[in-house]
Structures are given as C-alpha cells and as structure tokens.
Image (tube, rainbow, N blue to C red):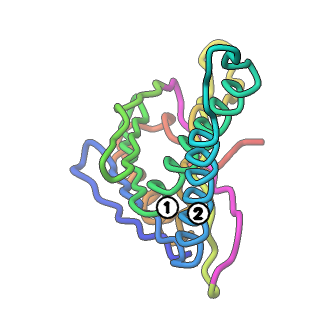
Amino acid sequence: MKNFSVVSTDRVNVYVISEIRSTILGKIIISMMLLSFIAVLFYGAFQFEPNEESKINVGFIFGVLIIGFILFLGFKYLLWNMFGEETLIVNNNHVSYHRGYGIVNTAVTTFNFDRMGIEYAATMKYEGVQYGNIVFINYRKPDNLPEEIFESGIEVSEAVYNEMIDCLNNIYNNERGLFLPFSQN
C-alpha cells in the first residue's frame, strides 16, 4: 500500500487529494471473488426451470437478492481499490469531501464547524512510513465539547498530514482560535 497524496492551497482553501494504491494481488482476489459470485448467480438462474406447477419460492428470490447485494458491494470495493480517490477541501468554516470510483463520483458533502480540531489517527507502518487517517473534530460553541465530524477514507502518510497542518496554519495565521492542530483531550 503506497497511497499517493498531494496537498495544495489557494490561500483560502487547503486541498488534499489522495489516491488508493492497492496491490495487484488484492485486485486479483477481489476480481476472482466477483467472478465466482457471478458464476453462482448464472448457474442458479439457468438451473431454475419454471413450469405451471412450480412457483418462484421466497428462498430463491431471497438468495438472488443476497448475491446481488454482495455483487454490488464487491464491485464498489473493486472500483475503490482500482480507481479510488478522495478530495478534502478545508477552509475557515467547513470541511468538504468527495470520493471518486473511476467511472462514478460521489456528490460533495460538507460539514460546518465552530472551532476545528484535527487529529492524526495512526493505523499502520508500511516500509518505514507511518500511515493514518485524518480526523476532523468540531468543538461546539455552547459547551466546547468535541464531536467528530469527518474521518478520511484513505490513509495518508504523516508527512502529508504535517504538510496539511502547515498550510492550515498559514491560512489561520490571522484568525486565532478557530483551528487546533491537535485534540485537547
């Protein structure tokens, strides 16, 4: 896993664009599992011979629905591992993100915050590089209690996280008190 991330800024927003770089073996395993489920689905469909006396039973329909759901999730997971991309946009009052699956992109989702905190949740070390998720926290105005508003879906290196923090510090230089580069807890 060598996820690729780029951090940029236009002095109003900080952009973090991350791409999945999964292994070929993982992509092959997911593809083979999907093909086996498709084979089972077609085998079941061709073995079913309706006649006037037999009716489609609930078990058959339920089985087709389960296999269809597994195929949908597996195909989505395969697209994510082949073409997955996540774009984070952070500015002084909200965090936005959208994900790309190659041929399908999700809509932009936005979370507003009063006072933002960011944590780096380290998850693994790969070839000497620490990887983890970026967690965005909102400190609510009425009671100053933290609530998690977003966690990145693609693990980024600690260097990318530090670069994002530097860009955010440059943006928030004149707006003291809105940004906490670590959790208070």
The residue positioned 62% from the left and 21% from the top of the image is: 51
Q: Nearer the viewer, mark 2 or mark 1?
A: 2
The amino acid sitting under disc 1 is Asn
Which amino acid, by three-letter code, is at mark 2? Ile
Majority secondary structure in the magenta region: strand
Q: Residue at x 53, y 30 (%)?
A: 115
Q: Which residue is mark 2?
A: 30
CA neighbours of label 1 inside 10 A, class few (<14), some (14 to 19), many (20+): many
Give whichever of 3, 88 is nearer the camera: 3
Q: Quarter holding the N terminus?
A: bottom right
The circle drawn on residue 140 is none
Q: Nearer the viewer, residue 43 or 147?
A: 43
Whether residue 26 is visible: yes
* Residue 124 within the magenta-colored segment of the rendering: yes
Report the residue marked by disc 1.
Answer: 81
- Which residue: 55% across, 46% down? 42
Nearer to the camera, 81 or 161: 81
Span highlighted in magenta in the image: 113-126
In the displayed structure, 88 sits above or below 120; it is above
Query: Neighbour class for label 2 at 10 Å: few (<14), some, many (≥20)?
Result: some
Coordinates of residue 157 in the picture (x, y in percent)? 54, 70
Q: Residue at x 60, y 44 (%)?
A: 41
